[in-house]
Image (tube, helix red, strand yellow):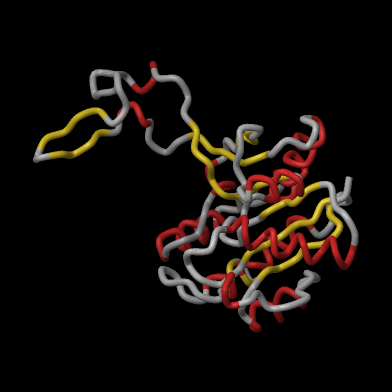
Amino acid sequence: MRILAIVPARGGSKRLPGKNLRPLGGKPLIAWSIDAVRAVPAIADVLISTDNEAIADIARQHGALVPWLRPAELSTDEVATADVCLHALDWYEAQRGKVDGVLVLQPTSPFRGRDTVVAGLDLYRARDFHRVVSFSPAAFHPMLCVRIDGGGISPFVEGGGFHLRSQDLPPAYAPNGALYLVSPCALRTTRSLYGDDVVPLVMNEPHRAIDIDTEMDWRVAESVLAAGMTGD
C-alpha cells in the first residue's frame, strides 16, 4: 500500500495568526503532523500544500515535501480542503507515480499521534480502501440541544429534551478533523473527503482530538503537554 499524506497549511489565520509556525512543546505546530507520519512504512511522502514560504521552509526542515507554493486561487477561506488535496494529488501522481490513498492531516491536530495514523491505515486496508474519517464522542449530546426562537426554546432533535437522562442516551459522535483517508478515485469522483462509504475511526481520548483554532485551544494543548499525555 502506497499512501500520500497531505498537510494543508495556509499562511493566513484570522483567529490565531501564525499558528502553523508557532512553537508548541519546542517545535512548530506543523511539525507535529509531519513527525506523526514520517516513519510510517506505508507513507510514500508527506506533501505540504501551503501558500506561505516560511511554512514551506520549516516543513522542508522537518523532512516534508514542498514542491511549490499553492496557487492564489486555492488559498482563500472559501476553498474546500478537497480541492486543495486534488491539486496536490494530481501533481504528485503525474510526477511520482500512482498512490493507493490520500491521507489528509490538518496541522491543527497535533496529538493524533503515529498510533492513530497506523490504526486509520489498517482500517482503510481492511475495509477495501473505503474512506476513513476520525470521530470523537460528541462534547454535548444533540438530543439535549435546543433551538431558540422568539424568546423560547424547543428541542433541536425531534424527541429530544431535558427530560432525558444523559446516561440513557445512545452514544453520539462528531468528526474531529484529525484524520481523513480517501482513495484517489473517490476523491476525484466526489470532490469531497466524505461520502456514503465512510468508515469511522473512533478516537476516545479527548486530548488526541484537540483541534487548535483559538488561543484557548492553544492553552489547552499546552496543558496537555505539561501533563505528559501525548505519548503514543
Q: Is residue 197 above or below residue 6?
A: above
Q: Give the x, y percent position of residue 177.
A: 56, 49
Q: Quadrant of the N terminus?
A: top right
Q: What x and y, as percent, mark residue 28? A: 63, 72
Along the line of sight, the residue nearer the viewer: 108 or 198: 198
Q: What residue is shown at x 74% (from left), y 39% (from top)? A: 119
- Residue 10: quarter of image: bottom right
Residue 19 visible somewhere in the drawing: yes
x, y percentage for residue 6?
71, 60
Q: Which residue shows up at 56% across the image and 72% down it?
A: 75
> Percent x, y for residue 93?
84, 60
Count every numbered label the image shows and give the total.
Answer: 0
- State which quadrant residue 36 falls in: bottom right
Q: Where, by quadrant of the figure, is residue 225 drawn?
A: bottom right
Describe residue 126's horizontal placement relative to residue 116 as left or right: right
156 w.r.t. 134: above or below = above
- Furthest residue toward front: 189
Of residues 188 and 136, which is closer to you in this image? 188
Residue 110 in view here: no
Question: Left or right: 85 with respect to 225?
Answer: right
Residue found at x 59% / y 75%: 21
Please identify the residue farthest to the top as the structure is shown: 168
